[in-house]
């Protein structure tokens, strides 16, 4: 995307050229529609036809931008906008289920084609060669630019398609938050549900077989995602039900939650914390090895690659050591009535600070303290 602040001289030249072209196309197209010099029905008043054209552009922008927003939304962490943009979050969750994205794309393409053809009917200009148009138009220009729809194409492409697509690509969450997006999504899905495009499923399957396409090993089929989610939920529920140490760790009565607790009790509590995490990890390994098939493990692996937030529910294993999950520590701190440090917040939280930044800051402070301590020793030695 061209940033206006960093635009060069050649960019501004193109801005001016494009603006003049768009302005010219808008004036010519609007004049032709109002004066009934297009291929639209003569029985419709010119001002009504112009309002229909504006409505057509708005609807086209909605379905064009909605497609881009749904695609770009996959790059955003759901928890980052769950509370700030609830409508976008709910619509994103609905579209991510099963084959809803493919169904939406089918219905959306029908809407786009209908809207574009309707716009063509509205904007196919028939200028009068005798000078009865807004300005004299040579016959070759009328045939080349107006009757072919090239003049109106500039308006449709820039305002009805490219503008909403660019905005939706840069601000997908904000775009999805608009109230109109949810009914627009269900209209597109409803068109596919009507069976109008159902033959596409058969044709797509035939094309896959003829071209000998195979499933991409790096992706997970939408139907299989549900299996991976169900397997993870069973594992997590089993861990919560079978790990009393984990529940004791989360209790406000835990020694770590009591500032006046005896140091020995705190040390014992820290041991309980680590033992609880090790116990939870052992249960996790047993549960996975004993009840999850290799195919399901593969699905879980691919699912977790695209849903990193699920990792926070389980302890981390680095080398031969087991470390508590960030979510477990955050829950314990919250249960004690303290504020959770920013580096323990979810990665999708706007206030999250990466742990390595905190570590670097601590290293810098530690180095400064060592230098100050060394200077103090030297001064004390001189006394």
Image (tube, rainbow, N blue to C red):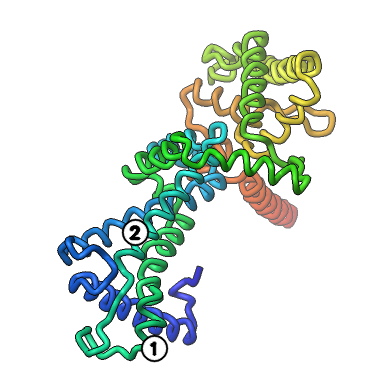
The picture quadrant where one finds residue 40 is: bottom left
269 lies left or right of 337? right
Q: Of marks 1 and 2, which one's residue comes earlier in the chain?
A: 2
CA neighbours of label 2 inside 10 A, class few (<14), some (14 to 19), many (20+): some
Q: Residue 122 location in percent, x, y?
A: 29, 65
Q: Nearer the viewer, residue 313 or 78?
A: 78
Q: Secondary structure at mark 2?
A: helix
Judging by the rendered image, the residue that carries numbered circle 2 is 118
Q: Residue 6 location in percent, x, y?
A: 49, 76
Q: Residue 87 location in percent, x, y?
A: 38, 38
Residue 369 visible in the shown view: no
Q: Which quadrant of the rendered structure holds the C terminus?
A: bottom right
Judging by the rendered image, the residue that carries numbered circle 1 is 140
Q: Residue 117 location in percent, x, y?
A: 38, 60
Q: Nearer the viewer, residue 121 or 362?
A: 121
Q: Nearer the viewer, residue 22 or 9?
A: 22
Relative to residue 307, is residue 128 depicted above or below? Answer: below
Q: Residue furthest right?
A: 320
Which residue is at 30% across, 89% downward? 137
Which residue is at 70% across, 20% downward? 277
Relative to residue 338, is residue 265 depicted above or below? Answer: above
The picture quadrant where one finds residue 300 is: top right
Q: How many marks?
A: 2
Residue 308 has which mark? none
Relative to residue 192, is residue 64 depicted above or below? Answer: below
Q: Secondary structure at mark 1?
A: helix
Residue 294 visible in the shown view: yes
CA neighbours of label 1 inside 10 A, class few (<14), some (14 to 19), many (20+): few
- The residues bearing labels 1 and 2 have C-alpha atoms spaced at a distance of 25 Å
Q: Nearer the viewer, residue 48 or 251?
A: 48
């Amino acid at each position: 995307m061209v940033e206006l602040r960093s635009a060069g001289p050649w960019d501004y030249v193109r801005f001016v050229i494009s603006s003049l072209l768009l302005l010219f196309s808008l004036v010519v197209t609007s004049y032709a529609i109002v004066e009934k010099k297009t291929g639209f029905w003569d029985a419709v008043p010119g001002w009504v036809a112009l309002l229909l054209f504006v409505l057509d552009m708005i609807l086209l922008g909605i379905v064009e931008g909605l497609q881009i927003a749904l695609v770009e939304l996959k790059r955003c962490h759901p928890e980052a906008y769950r509370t700030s943009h609830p409508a976008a979050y709910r619509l994103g969750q609905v579209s991510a289920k099963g084959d809803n994205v493919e169904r939406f794309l089918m219905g959306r393409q029908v809407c786009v084609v209908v809207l574009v053809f309707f716009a063509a009917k509205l904007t196919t200009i028939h200028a009068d060669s005798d000078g009865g148009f807004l300005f004299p138009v040579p016959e070759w220009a009328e045939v080349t630019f107006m009757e072919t729809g090239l003049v109106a194409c500039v308006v449709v492409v820039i305002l009805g398609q490219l503008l909403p697509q660019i905005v939706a690509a840069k601000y997908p969450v904000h775009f999805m938050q608009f109230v109109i997006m949810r009914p627009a999504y269900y209209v597109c899905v409803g068109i596919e549900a009507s069976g109008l495009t159902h033959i596409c499923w058969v044709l797509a399957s035939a094309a896959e077989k003829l071209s000998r396409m195979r499933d991409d090993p790096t992706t997970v089929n939408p139907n299989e995602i549900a299996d991976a989610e169900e397997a993870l939920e069973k594992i997590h529920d089993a861990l919560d039900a079978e790990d009393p140490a984990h529940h004791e760790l989360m209790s406000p009565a835990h020694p770590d939650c009591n500032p006046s607790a005896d140091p020995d009790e705190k040390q014992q509590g820290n041991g309980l914390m680590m033992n609880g995490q090790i116990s939870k990890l052992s249960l996790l390994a047993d549960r996975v090895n004993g009840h999850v098939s290799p195919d399901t493990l593969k699905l879980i692996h691919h699912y977790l690659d695209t849903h990193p937030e699920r990792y926070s529910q389980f302890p981390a294993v680095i080398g031969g050591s087991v470390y508590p999950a960030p979510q477990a520590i955050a829950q314990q701190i919250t249960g004690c009535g303290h504020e959770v440090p920013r580096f323990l917040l979810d990665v999708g939280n706007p206030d999250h600070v990466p742990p390595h930044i905190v570590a670097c800051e601590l290293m810098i402070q530690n180095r400064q303290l060592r230098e100050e301590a060394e200077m103090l020793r030297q001064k004390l030695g001189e006394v």
